[in-house]
């Protein structure tokens, strides 16, 4: 078992380059199934969820060729099956995108019920509602989703809940459907826009992505032989922004889209940090202890739930008492018990937590309880006095490329050690 050994405290300083967005990449890879041709995807993060997605594509008959570390060529001219390997699809959340993609490509899909971070109940009823509205028959039993459609026909779909996954999945299933599909109350995250841009590059006709009404005019076929570059990762950039603030550091974060980070920048200003927009990079710094804040997570453009643990670390050492209300996931405060082992004073109950700021954290053995919790605990280890041992790195490796190298380049004393 690997662990990260982190010696703190360190004030992070320097430049870091952000990778392509995990949550866009894990939708774009299955979306290549919609074309009978060759796709070249650049700026793709080299993380374990991406590798799993590629393995699944290979098992379905695609040829996957890594041209460079962050560039992959996928040939989907010879798809031989719409039955995915259930043991692999059950390992990560985004495998649900195979249902929309395979329905579009083959008219049928069999996919293991998605796994991923344990953040509480993660229903997929809105995905199913979308597929059924388009004319598919969907069954969930024996740990798998089976979907079949003789023909998919465009229609109006109102999402009862703003869902990133359901919005993308319905886009995927309706790109090749007959007629027009309208998604009302759609999610607006940057990776929704990125997946729509990607599909439009292949010849789809999607309008309105980034607003709450998306219209998809079905096309007969998509065209291969194109190159697409994945959008920079909003959450990875936000993670380094909060690392700068929590460590009283000074970081230039390169290859990001500052506009996507406005929701995080606003909170950083509130807690006394500095942020400067440099066009395609962002400069974040402070030399003060963070101030207190009240944070509520919301769908984009609200404060992202995937940034909640990272701002939680900054608030754990803030001057004053802060409150975080989590409105997306039921169990997103598991990391607070780990931070308390490091000397934080956090009381979490249900979907709220009270952070009584302490002056310092102290190194301790801690466990990444999920992906973003893991990133937050790295920041905690960097700002804490002494030695932190962080376990359960599988969670972190699912979504962050070379994370310890990136933190090390900013001055962090961090090593991956095999036990
Ligand atoms: C995606 C992200 C995840 C992020 C989340 C919210 C990926 C691979 N994962 O997850 O990192 O935390 O968005 O920004 O992109 N819901 C339903 N029924 C459904 C679908 C969702 O009730 O059919 C609920 C969920 O329980 C949750 C809320 O809607 O309370 C938002 O979930 P959703 O946006 O779908 O999250 P994911 O797509 O799973």
Image: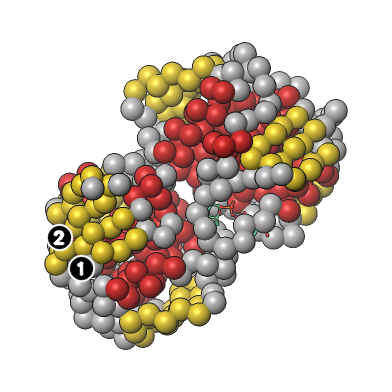
Residue 118 percent across, percent down from the top left: 52, 58
Q: Residue at x 62, y 13 (%)?
A: 78
Q: Residue at x 67, y 45 (%)?
A: 143
Element class at badge 2: strand
Task: Determine whether, in the image, residue 39 is placed left or right of residue 132.
Answer: left
Q: Is residue 335 left or right of residue 79?
A: left
Q: Who's the residue at 46% across and 70% down the image?
A: 333
Q: Is residue 372 above or below residue 38?
A: below
Image vertical order of residue 308 relative to residue 188, above or below:
below
| Drawn side of residue 79 relative to residue 313, left or right | right
Kindly identify which residue carries mark 1: 363
Where in the figure is residue 54, as x and y percent of width and height? 49, 28
Cβ–Cβ under 8 Å for marks 1 and 2: yes
- Circle 1 sits in a helix, a strand or a loop, which is it? loop
Relative height, residue 377 to residue 151 (above, below): below
Gap between marks 1 and 2, in whole Å? 8 Å
- Residue, disc 2: 7
Residue furthest out toward the top? 78
The image quadrant in which ligand 1 is located = bottom right
The earlier-in-sequence mark between 1 and 2 is 2
> Which residue is nearer to you in this view: 156 or 125?
125
Q: Position of residue 382 (x, y in %)?
A: 21, 62
- The mark found on residue 21 in the picture is none
Q: Quadrant of residue 43?
A: top left
The one of 330 and 86 positioned closer to us in this rendering: 86
| Residue 359 appears in the rendering | yes
At label 2, counting other C-alpha atoms closer than 10 Å, the crowd grade (few under 14, some 14-19, many 20 or more) is many
């Amino acid at each position: 078992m690997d662990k990260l050994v982190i010696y703190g405290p360190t004030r992070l300083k320097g430049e870091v380059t952000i990778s392509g967005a995990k949550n866009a990449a894990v939708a774009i890879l299955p979306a290549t199934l919609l074309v009978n041709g060759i796709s070249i995807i650049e700026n793709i993060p080299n993380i374990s969820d991406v590798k799993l997605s590629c393995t699944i594509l290979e098992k379905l008959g695609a040829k996957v060729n890594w041209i460079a570390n962050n560039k992959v060529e996928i040939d989907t001219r010879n798809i031989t099956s719409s039955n995915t390997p259930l043991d692999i699809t059950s390992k990560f959340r985004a495998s649900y995108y195979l249902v929309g993609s395979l329905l579009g490509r083959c008219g049928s899909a069999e996919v293991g019920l998605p796994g991923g971070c344990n953040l509480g109940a993660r229903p997929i009823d809105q995905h199913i509602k979308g597929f059924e509205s388009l004319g598919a028959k969907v069954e969930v039993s024996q740990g798998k989703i089976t979907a079949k459609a003789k023909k998919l026909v465009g229609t109006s779909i109102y999402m009862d809940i703003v869902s990133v996954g359901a919005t993308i999945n319905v886009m995927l299933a309706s790109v090749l459907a007959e007629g027009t599909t309208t998604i009302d109350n759609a999610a607006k995250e940057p990776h929704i826009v990125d997946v729509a841009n990607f599909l439009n590059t292949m010849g789809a006709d999607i309008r309105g992505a980034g607003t709450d009404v998306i219209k998809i005019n079905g096309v007969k076929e998509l065209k291969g032989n194109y190159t697409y570059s994945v959008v920079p990762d909003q959450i990875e950039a936000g993670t380094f922004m909060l690392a700068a603030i929590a460590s009283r550091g000074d970081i230039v974060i390169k290859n990001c889209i500052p506009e996507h980070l406005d929701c995080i920048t606003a909170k950083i200003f509130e807690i006394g940090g500095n942020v400067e927009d440099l066009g395609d990079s962002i400069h974040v710094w402070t030399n003060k202890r963070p101030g207190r804040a009240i944070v509520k997570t919301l769908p984009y453009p609200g404060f992202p739930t995937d940034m909640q643990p990272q701002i939680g670390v900054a608030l754990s050492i803030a001057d004053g008492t802060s409150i975080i209300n989590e409105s997306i996931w039921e169990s997103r405060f598991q990391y607070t018990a780990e931070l308390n082992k490091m000397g934080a004073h956090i009381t979490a109950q249900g979907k709220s937590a009270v952070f009584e700021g302490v002056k310092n954290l102290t190194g301790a053995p801690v466990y990444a309880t999920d992906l973003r919790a893991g990133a937050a605990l790295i920041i905690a280890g960097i700002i804490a006095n002494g030695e932190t041992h962080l376990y359960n790195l599988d969670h972190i490796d699912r979504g962050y490329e070379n994370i310890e190298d990136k933190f090390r380049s900013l001055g962090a004393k961090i090593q991956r050690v095999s036990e």
